[in-house]
Amino acid sequence: MDLDLATLQVISETLKEAPQASQRTLAKKANMSLGMMNAILGRFVERGWIMLTNVNGRKLAYAVTPDGLTELANRGKKFALRTFKLANVYSEAFCRRFMEAKAAGKTKVVLYGDSYIKFIIKYACSEVGLDFEQKDTSATILIDEVCLAGELNDDDVQKKLIEKGCFNLVEIIQDCK
């Protein structure tokens, strides 16, 4: 079902850009064969997600129906809910890890490099009462800090930071699953 909705999303976006897009254009944008797109469009028409009209003897026009738009909106809502749930799980994991570090005498959390989840790390720091700081990957690692290696670092830099005692953010996140 997710693949169908992803394809419906591509069709919807393509039709926004080019309302008279052909089946061939839709297939190309969805990275599939013309025959596969034909079958999918037929299935989407049956589900009520796509409406087609005959423009002339050979040319068809496609439109995403209100039901199709509702499916896409629901997909967006489900994605947002999954994202919020994961953010909460990650936040709790960082809070636990930082509380343990604080109990062990650490006074701050330092992110070396950058991270897509920096906002979660900052939040967890504020929840447990640790300072947060972001430093360049070449900065000196201090003994009183929780050292995190940002996942956006180059592989070589990441490896060196982990060898120096930094936690790998990706591993922390994977432990949550």
Image (cartoon, helix red, strand yellow):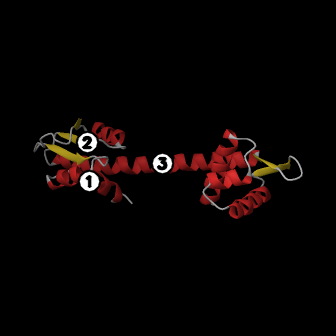
Residue 32 versus residue 41: which sits nearer the camera? 32
Instruction: Tell me the SS state at disc 2.
Output: loop
Quadrant containing the N terminus in the rendered view: bottom right
Circle 3 or circle 2, nearest the eye? 2
The residue beneath circle 1 is 155
Residue 6 image point, x, y percent: 61, 54
Question: Dot 3, how many residues are within 10 Å of its Cα: few (below 14), some (14-19), or many (20+)?
Answer: few
Amino acid carrying mark 1 in the image: Asp
- Which quarter of the picture shows residue 5? bottom right
Circle 1 or circle 3, nearest the eye? 1
> How far separated are the C-alphas under marks 3 and 2?
23 Å
User: Closer to the N terminus: mark 1 or mark 3?
Assistant: 3
> How far separated are the C-alphas under marks 1 and 3?
26 Å
Residue 19 image point, x, y percent: 73, 41
- On residue 113, which mark appears? 2
Amino acid carrying mark 2 in the image: Gly
Q: Is residue 140 above or below residue 86?
A: above
Q: Is residue 159 left or right of residue 83?
A: left
Q: Residue at x 59, y 46 (%)?
A: 76
Q: Is residue 29 above or below residue 124?
A: below
> How far separated are the C-alphas under marks 2 and 1?
12 Å
Residue 114 image point, x, y percent: 29, 41
- On residue 83, which mark appears? 3
Q: Residue at x 76, y 43 (%)?
A: 20
- Which quarter of the picture shows residue 108? top left
Residue 84 versus residue 16: which sits nearer the camera? 16
